[in-house]
């Protein structure tokens, strides 16, 4: 431990762990929260300084959550153990949020649908085509990533989409895909894929209720735009 500054070496008023115990987790700043996860700094840098530098390097949580082990380890003071701990915490948070969303979430509007996937999809660096399957009460029963890559009518095959719908006995479904640019304006390809899926859904008895394009904190519903 000779080259590390443990949390006990930080003055008590500056200890994020003690602040969490006294005031609750919501009282912690982003820097303090990361400091608790890291646990220690180094000989020349406190854990709060290290967490601040880490967040500054990745411009906050937006890019930190996408960082690989290798990218994290390039930060001075972040070794394998700290990098693994960071990724485990990010994944834990994602799974907890996912379970909370998936517990009989009801979709009554395009806004409900967009809210269900927004935080998961808005920062993805590649296009993801996601299908959310609903029961007769419009409650979510399953969510599946069907395809990753640029949307193309010859690649997003209805067979792959509706195979999962039939397997889950879904009454209806909503399609989503993201635009990494942050602009959710639908392309002609988006519209063509949607019309093909709607037609196939009618033949097998699974309604395609909407296709929602996700941008950065904004979305476009093709149903609302009259494009399906």
Image: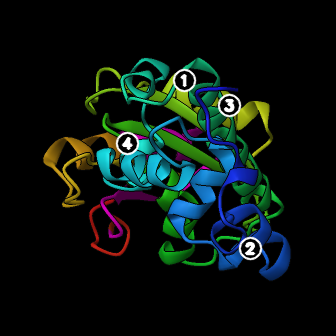
Q: Residue at x 38, y 30 (%)?
A: 75
Q: Is residue 44 above or below residue 21?
A: above
Quote the CA–CA distance across marks 2 and 3: 47 Å
Looking at the picture, how far across and down is residue 89, in whole percent?
68, 42
- The mark nearer the N terminus, 4 or 1, is 4
Q: Is residue 58 above or below residue 80?
A: below
Pointer 4 residue: 124
Quickly name the residue at label 3.
Answer: 164
Is-magenta flag for residue 199? yes
Front residue of 90/162: it is 90
Asked whether 222 or 41 is in front, the reply is 41
Disc 4, disc 3: CB below 8 Å? no
Q: Which residue, given by chain and number where applicable, does mark 1 sit on?
A: 160
Q: What segment is highlighted magenta in the picture? A: 196-218
Residue 18 colored magenta? no
Q: Earlier in the sequence, mark 2 or mark 3?
A: 2
Q: CA distance from mark 4 to mark 1?
A: 22 Å
Closest to the observer: 6 or 88? Answer: 6
Residue 133 in sight here = yes
Q: Residue 212, how many percent across, how many down?
A: 40, 59
Callouts 1 and 3 close, C-beta under 8 Å: yes
Task: From the top left corner, tell me how far across and down residue 41 is, in percent.
Answer: 56, 41
């Amino acid at each position: 431990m000779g080259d590390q500054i443990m949390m006990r070496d930080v003055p008590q008023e500056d200890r994020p762990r003690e602040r969490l115990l006294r005031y609750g987790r919501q009282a912690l700043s982003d820097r303090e929260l990361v400091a608790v996860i890291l646990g220690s700094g180094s000989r020349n840098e406190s854990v709060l300084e290290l967490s601040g530098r880490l967040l500054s390097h990745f411009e906050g949580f937006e890019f930190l959550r996408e960082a690989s082990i290798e990218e994290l380890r390039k930060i001075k003071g972040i070794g394998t153990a700290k990098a693994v701990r960071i990724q485990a915490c990010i994944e834990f948070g994602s799974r907890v949020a996912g379970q909370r969303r998936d517990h009989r979430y009801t979709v009554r509007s395009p806004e409900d649908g967009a809210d269900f996937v927004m935080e998961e999809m808005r920062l993805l660096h590649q296009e993801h085509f996601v299908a959310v399957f609903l029961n007769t009460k419009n409650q979510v029963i399953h969510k599946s990533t069907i395809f990753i890559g640029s949307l193309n009518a010859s690649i997003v095959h209805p067979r792959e989409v509706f195979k999962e719908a039939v397997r889950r006995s879904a009454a209806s479904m909503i399609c989503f895909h993201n635009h990494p640019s942050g602009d959710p304006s639908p392309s002609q390809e988006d519209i063509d894929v949607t019309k093909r899926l709607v037609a196939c859904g009618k033949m097998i008895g699974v309604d395609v209720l909407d296709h929602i394009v996700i941008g950065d904190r904004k979305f476009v519903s093709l149903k609302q735009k009259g494009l399906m």
